[in-house]
Amino acid sequence: MPTHKKISSVSELHKFLFEGLPVRGMVVRLTDAWTEILQRRAQSSTGAYAPPVQALLGEMVAAGALMQSNIKFHGALILQVYGDGPVKLAVAEVQSDLSLRATATVQGPVADGANLSAMLNLKGQGRCAVTLDPKDRLPGQQPYQGVVPLTDGQDQPLQSLAQALQLYMRQSEQLETTLVLAADDKVAAGLLIQRLPIEGAGNLEAQGEQSVEEQQEHYNRIAMLASSLKREELLTLDVETILRRLFWEEKLQRFMPHAGETAPRFACTCSRERVGRMIQGLGETEAREILAERGAILVDCEFCGAHYRFDTIDTTQLFTTAGDRPPSSSAIQ
Ligand SMILES: [Zn+2]
């Protein structure tokens, strides 16, 4: 059905529950947050993404925002896909305040219309990793990471990111999830439907007299409605229209959307201090070799395109004063 409704130009994320049923849902539409990522890439030395890579990365950003809001994790949710195809690595990172960034490293030509498998999983080495990196990580504490292959139980390559993430949710969170994702050069959007964990399994009254079978039927019905949403509809329709068309027979309990001030938005976490720590990590010998060869250490942020330059004096400071200055003055501006 064609639509002539005006699409809002700001990013938003909406949460809802199916009243009386153990099912929740979420819709995200990233407009300005997504185009900012694309524009920064187009202006970088690597240039704009090929359309299939753009679509994959947009779907990752939309999925990352949905997953971060779903678990409300205090820290960064990092979604990565990597493998043995022309796309070496794609990363989407979403913080708990829904600020987000994304980048992809492409090492070969990507054919028009290439799917997930053609981009990342030519020889079955493709993986999808979800990392939860706590904001205030204690010394020695490791981020949590879950990894799934980009193949199904029968070793068949998965065709889409949504399939890989549904697999991840089932394996790592034991939650049945339906995801519809889509992205183009203007919008990155996603719909998530998830069966809520049953509290106190066996206690039927907790779910209003519904048997486990009945609950499963409700989830199946809602999941099927969600799956009927077409890519094109997800990209072009506003959130209200999507929810009305899919779930007009269901009772939805809506929550305050993340829009305006609290909307998902682009932000990069890179800084000169972090780049300095990375150079310290290289070690003084290697840093001096780069200086001797190129005159300065130049680092470009892959996520936002920021340029960082460390000359001989900056680099000497990194390796001579790191240990004997108080931490507050160790940031190099
Ligand atoms: Zn950056």
Image (cartoon, rainbow, N blue to C red):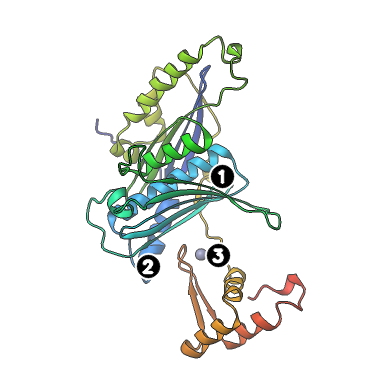
- Sequence-wise, the earlier of marks 1 and 3 is 1
Query: Residue 24's x, y, as percent?
Result: 50, 27
Q: Amino acid at mark 2?
A: Gln
Q: Secondary structure at mark 3?
A: loop
Mark 2–mark 1 contact, CB under 8 Å? no
Q: CA distance from mark 2 to mark 3?
A: 18 Å
Query: Residue 302's x, y, as percent?
Result: 45, 65
Looking at the image, the residue that sits furthest to the top is: 209
Q: For the residue with label 3, is its CB less than 8 Å from the closest atom of ligand 1?
A: yes
Q: Secondary structure at mark 1?
A: helix
Given residues 201 and 238, the one toward you in this image is 201
Query: Residue 43's x, y, as percent?
Result: 37, 67
Q: Which residue is mark 3?
A: 270
- Sequence-wise, the earlier of marks 2 and 1 is 2
- Sequence-wise, the earlier of marks 2 and 3 is 2
Q: Depth-wise, is mark 2 or mark 3 nearer the camera?
A: 3
Name the residue rendered at 33%, 67% in the picture. Answer: 47
Q: CA distance from mark 2 to mark 1?
A: 27 Å
Looking at the image, the residue that sits furthest to the left is: 112
Q: Amino acid at mark 3?
A: Cys
Residue 244 vs 208, above or below: the answer is below
Density class for disc 1 (Cα within 10 Å; few <14, some 14-19, many ≥20) is some
Q: Quadrant of the N terminus?
A: top left
How many numbered circles are shown? 3
Q: Which quarter of the figure has residue 151?
A: top left
Q: Which residue is mark 1?
A: 262
Q: Which residue is mark 2?
A: 43
